[in-house]
Amino acid sequence: MSDAGSDPKPFELADAAAKQHAPATERNRAPIADALRAILPASGLVLEIASGTGEHAVHFASEFPMLEWQPTDVSDAALASIAAWRAESGLTNLLPPVKLDLAAGDCPVETAEAIFCANMTHIAPWAATVGLFALAGRILARGAPLALYGPFIEADTPTAPSNLAFDANLKARDPSWGLREVAAIDELATSNGLVRDARIAMPANNLILVYRRV
């Protein structure tokens, strides 16, 4: 999936069951990793939601060798791509990808020390975000983080023109898609036993929102 500030079109996986590439991952993976150093625990399992091509999973598993990285996705094409990138990497702390449908209430693991999700909330129905926070409320221990990366809408901050164009493009493609309001996500978090304790500005008009289980 693409960064909103650099490309007005969402990334889409091809149908072919092979290793695939999202150009935005090469641009955003280093800044995201730098931010995650202050968020993720020293050890344990990180559940990555909507891993897409799998390139983020490979990079972050390499950057954080003391963590087990569990990639997931709802798309069979994504799962095939993740598996291909994983096989090429040879990383022992990168686990095989697992299919996860948040809207269906799936739960591939019983517990996790952290959850990471990039560029999903706006390129999926709202039910997926609802499912994400319900999952976080069930499997995260007290104080454990859920980190969301992507473009969002904030009531007191002007939305960048590129993000507005991206939002219009998404809604034209699927009315159930679109940039989410931070206030709505905060409310959803509270209803599932999480609170936001960080807002990190990222390149290309993106944010990392960090929620923790209370």
Image: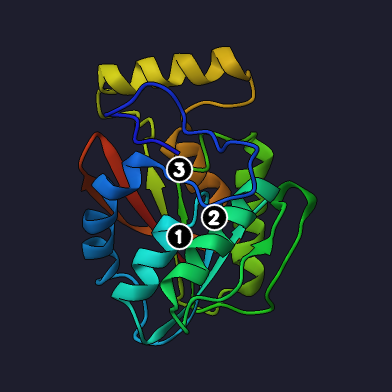
In the rendered view, tell whether residue 183 sits above or below residue 109. Answer: above
What is the C-alpha distance between the residues marked 2 and 3?
21 Å
Quadrant location of residue 107? Answer: bottom right
Q: Do the residues labelled 2 and 3 touch (CB within 8 Å)?
A: no
Vertical relation: 69 (above or below) 35: below
**Amino acid type, residue under disc 1 in the picture:** Val
Where disc 1 sits, the SS reads strand
Q: How would you rate the neighbour count of disc 2 (Cα within 10 Å): few for under 14, some for 14-19, many for 20 or more?
A: some
* x 33%, y 51%: residue: 208
Residue that label 3 marks: 119
Q: Which residue is more in the foreground, 127 or 5?
A: 5
**Neighbourhood count class around disc 1 (C-alpha, 10 Å): few under 14, some 14–19, many 20 upward:** many
Q: How many labels does the image show?
A: 3
Q: Are marks 1 and 2 in contact (CB under 8 Å)?
A: yes
The residue sitting at 27% across, 63% down in the picture is 33
- SS class of the residue under badge 2? helix
At horizontal 54% and vertical 55% (from top left) the residue drawn is 190
In the image, what residue type sits under mark 3? Asn
For discs 2 and 3, the disc positioned in front in the rendered view: 3
* Residue at 55% over, 17% down: 171
